[in-house]
Image: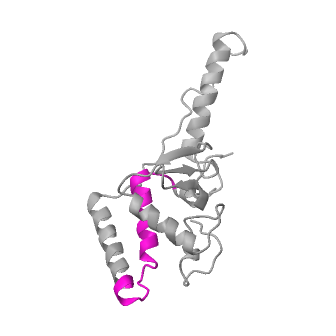
Amino acid sequence: MTIIRTKDRPDGITESSWNNYVRHLKALYSFGIKHGLIACSQNPFIDVSVKQPKVSKKSLQPFQIRYAREVLEVCRRYEHCYNERSKIHPAWFWQTLMETFFYTGIRLNQLLHIEAGDINLKKRVFRTSAVGSKTHSESIMPIPDGLYPYMRQLIVAAHNSGFKREDQLFNVNRFSHRHKRTTMDT
């Protein structure tokens, strides 16, 4: 029986999950064997780790970041000057989203769970929810100087759009007529 994910069995666990389970079970068995709590002399979890596939890093090169910033700035200026929607609309929103990822390094799921009331511009901090966190813990993060103008613009736009404290802050649907959903997801 195969429990690790394969092409034929896409519902299996990933290699990294398997190796994580193996590490924990290996440690438990080693402790049990060492203290005579388990009736076996050899750890069955030795040499059962699997090779994990090499995946490319999920980060952008500096030139890619510069290019994305330039494209978003052109779109923002176009919308401002011509009072028309650009291909990436609203550009100011997507700039804020990109700069938030750049300056904070938070995960997409964390960003999607930020509520309007989580931002404190006076103290220059924001709260990330435990719901969107990989570690399931809430944290307070600083708003760096480079991110502050974008975050301020987002909060002002949210206030002008009638956001409540518990409303999802990073929600393009609330700032664009092009999008029709009530919440934003991945």
Residue 131 point in image, percent of width and height: 64, 51
Q: Residue at image x 72%, y 16%?
A: 38
Q: Residue at image x 29%, y 68%?
A: 67
Classify residue 137 as left or right of residue 83: right
Whether residue 113 is visible to the viewer of this picture, yes or no, is no
Residue 139, placed above or below residue 92: above
Q: Nearer the viewer, residue 36 or 90?
A: 90
Whether residue 131 is visible to the viewer of this picture, yes or no, is yes
Q: Nearer the viewer, residue 145 or 133?
A: 145
Classify residue 40 as left or right of residue 96: right
Residue 20, placed above or below residue 68: above
Q: Residue furthest top?
A: 35
Does 83 appear in magenta? yes
Q: Nearer the viewer, residue 63 or 94?
A: 94
Residue 138 point in image, percent of width and height: 60, 44
Quadrant of residue 167 within the rendered picture: bottom right
Which segment did they paint magenta?
A: 79-107
Q: Nearer the viewer, residue 69 or 60?
A: 69
Classify residue 108 as left or right of residue 80: right
- Indicate the colouring scheme: one colour
Does 11 appear in magenta? no
Q: Quadrant of the C terminus?
A: bottom right
Q: Quadrant of the N terminus?
A: top right
Quadrant of residue 150 within the rendered picture: bottom left
Classify residue 15 as left or right of residue 165: left
Residue 179 point in image, percent of width and height: 57, 80
Count of numbered labels shown in the rendering: 0
Residue 107 point in image, percent of width and height: 51, 53
Q: Residue at image x 30%, y 58%?
A: 61
Residue 90, placed above or below residue 99: below
